[in-house]
Image (cartoon, rainbow, N blue to C red):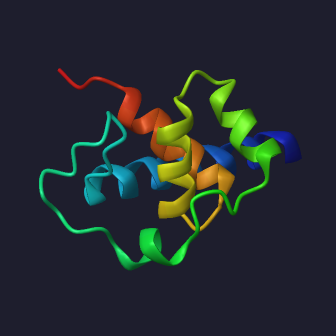
Amino acid sequence: MPGSALQEQEDQQLAQALANSAREGFKVSGSSNQGHPSTSITSAQPMNDFPEENIQKLVQLGFSRENVLEALRRFNGDIDQAMAALFAMSLKLP
């Protein structure tokens, strides 16, 4: 079925984004950078240079505006990667 193949591809992409986020140690739980300097992506991207519609989509999913902006900056405005990272970091591992 074509729909199943598309769903499988999307699942694989989400799994890859989650793995990348976990590997990079992306933190969204507050402003604790633990003394690490900002990346060039963060400093190169103005704080509110993202469509408000994209910000609101992620905020409506339950993430704070601050965390949403941080994720969007980290992924150069890619809402799908930002959402995957936000969800990945909201999961508590045992």
Q: Is residue 36 above or below residue 55?
A: below
Q: Position of residue 12 (x, y in %)?
A: 56, 50
Of 22 and 50, nearer the camera is 50
Q: Is residue 59 visible?
A: yes
Q: Position of residue 10 (x, y in %)?
A: 67, 48
Left or right? Give the position of 52 relative to 75: right
Q: Quadrant of residue 23?
A: bottom left
Of 60 and 22, nearer the camera is 60
Left or right? Give the position of 33 relative to 70: left
Q: Is residue 93 above or below residue 43?
A: above
Of 25 and 64, nearer the camera is 64
Q: Quadrant of residue 3?
A: top right
Q: Position of residue 59 (x, y in %)?
A: 64, 30
Furthest residue in direction left, as rendered: 35
Q: Is residue 93 above or below residue 36?
A: above
Q: Is residue 1 visible?
A: no
Quarter holding the C terminus is top left
Q: Position of residue 18 (x, y in %)?
A: 43, 47
